[in-house]
Amino acid sequence: MCVPDLGQFLVRCMLVEDCRLDCLRSKPRTRALVRELFARNQRWIGKQHWALEPASAWESEQQVHGSFQASQLGMKLVLLQRHFLVNGTRQLTNHLQRIQSLASYEEFFHMMDIGEQTLMDIHAQLRQAVKDSARRGYNEGL
């Protein structure tokens, strides 16, 4: 998935019934959305927190934590949009509280219904995001 504006893409999905029912209930599509989100988020993550190889277990943990701290706002916005796409306004207050208290990638993956991810899984996805971001030119001018 490569769209000029991820936010506009999600809003357009909300307007198309077939997309709303299918777009974020499909695990492969959700994973593609998360991969694109992570690639775009690299722009907001300081280079010292980019997930790079080789990395020790400690370095991986620091990179994942620093990356999450810098990019959590984008993840929270996607979670909010996903909730509207899948549930409308049902249970919105409870979901908003969960989104506001989001504290880790593990919680993000759980709320996106992707499943359990280990620290190493997350680090691997973030390493791929650095490569995707560079290939697509998202960080030009930094």
Image (spheres, rainbow, N blue to C red):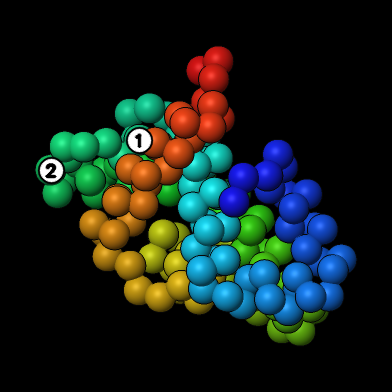
Mark 2, other Cα within 10 Å: few <14 / some 14–19 / many ≥20: few
Given the image, on which type of amino acid does mark 1 rest?
Answer: Trp
Residue found 23% across the figure and 46% down from its top: 60
Tell me: 100 left or right of 62. right
Where residue 49 sits in the image (x, y, percent)?
A: 34, 35
Where residue 88 sits in the image (x, y, percent)?
A: 79, 78
Instruction: Locate residue 95: give its quadrant.
Output: bottom right
Residue found 79% across the figure and 75% down from its top: 18
Instruction: Locate residue 15: give its quadrant.
Output: bottom right
Mark 1, other Cα within 10 Å: few <14 / some 14–19 / many ≥20: many
> Which residue occupies the extreme top position in the image?
141
Given the image, on which type of amino acid does mark 2 rest?
Answer: Ser
Lower position in the chain sequence, tag 1 or tag 2: 1
The circle drawn on residue 138 is: none
The circle drawn on residue 56 is: 2
Tell me the element at label 2.
Answer: loop
Tell me: 84 left or right of 79. right
Residue at mark 1 to residue at mark 2: CA–CA distance:
14 Å
Tell me: 57 left or right of 83. left
Q: Is residue 43 visible?
A: no
Instruction: Out of 102 and 75, give the one closest to the viewer.
Output: 75
Q: Against 23, is 78 above or below?
A: above
Residue found 84% across the figure and 68% down from its top: 16
Where residue 105 sits in the image (x, y, percent)?
A: 41, 59
Label 1: which residue? 50
Tell me the element at label 1.
Answer: loop
Where residue 28 sits in the image (x, y, percent)?
A: 51, 69
> Which residue occupies the extreme left position in the image?
56
Q: Against 113, is 69 above or below?
A: above
